[in-house]
Amino acid sequence: MKVIIPAAGYATRLYPLTMNKPKHLLDVKGKPIIEHIIKKIEELNAVDEIFIITNEKFYSNFKGWSKKFSSKVTIKIFNDGTTSNDDRLGSIGDIKFVLDKTKLDDNLLVVAGDNLFNFSLKEVYDFFIDKKTNINALYDIKSFEDARQLGVATINKEGKIIEFKEKPQFPKSTLVSPAIYLFPRHKVNLISKYIKEDNNPDKIGYFMEWLLANDELYGYVYEEKWFDIGWPSSLDQARKEFKG
């Protein structure tokens, strides 16, 4: 299986911490955020390559980090060529960029590079192997107000997602997407199809909405803590509560 870690955002809400450093390389519990993510990926023992996609501004930061970091999985860094929020490709655009560069023909795991979570990826991976279809990991944030800022899913008793809305004004559930997705080899091409149809390349949540209308999508719900490192307050919380 291959992994894509989108890490091409500019994290302006975390300024001044991220003026000259990507948030994915900010320290939490003694190591950069992205190293915690890679550790979770390594634990699967099912991944042979990790592709990190960043931008022109932070490409040298990631290259410098990668020279010092050792992993049992091959890691490749890609530069999408953008320099600001004005010309960014968006999360789905960046994933498509990597797919085109690598000619990827394998099962695919996507994990956002600013994600921290106390749970293991093994459970959602086993669920993926069982279902053999598109999977979106879910987290019960237990707050309708907080859910309004995220992608929100409604599932049936089999775990099939029957509704998904990106940042709904009136969420129907508190199950949100922590930006962890799995796609079987024969469905990875749907990402390119989505982009070719001129759909929104920014948030992966919009692609989840499209999948519901054009294919199928299942959700695996986690209870353990998830941290969305988008604000100084969430970074502070992760530094206190993340278990590594």
Image: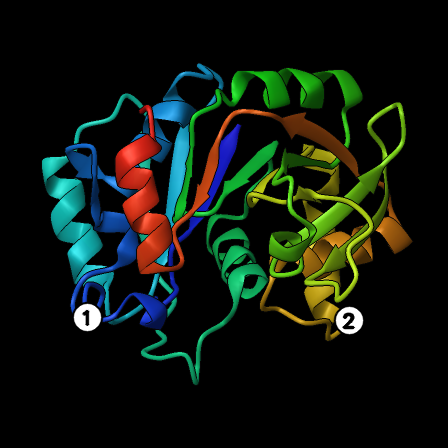
Q: Earlier in the sequence, mark 2 or mark 1?
A: 1
Is residue 14 visible from the viewing direction of this image? yes
- What residue is shown at x 64% (from left), y 15% (from top)? 126
Label 1: how many Cα within 10 Å (few below 14, some 14–19, many 20+):
few
Is residue 192 visible from the viewing direction of this image? no
- The amino acid type found where label 1 is placed reads Pro
- What residue is shown at x 60% (from left), y 63% (from top)? 203
- The amino acid type found where label 2 is placed reads Glu
- Rendered view: 201 above or below 233: below
* In the foreground, 137 or 185: 137
Q: Choose top left, top right, bottom left or bottom right for residue 179.
A: top right
User: Could you tell me if the residues under marks 2 and 1 are in contact, i.e. CB atoms within 8 Å?
Assistant: no
- Rendered view: 204 above or below 76: below
- What residue is shown at x 68% (from left), y 67% (from top)? 195
Q: How is the image coloured?
A: rainbow
**In the image, which disc is placed on residue 197?**
2
Q: Which residue is mark 1?
A: 16
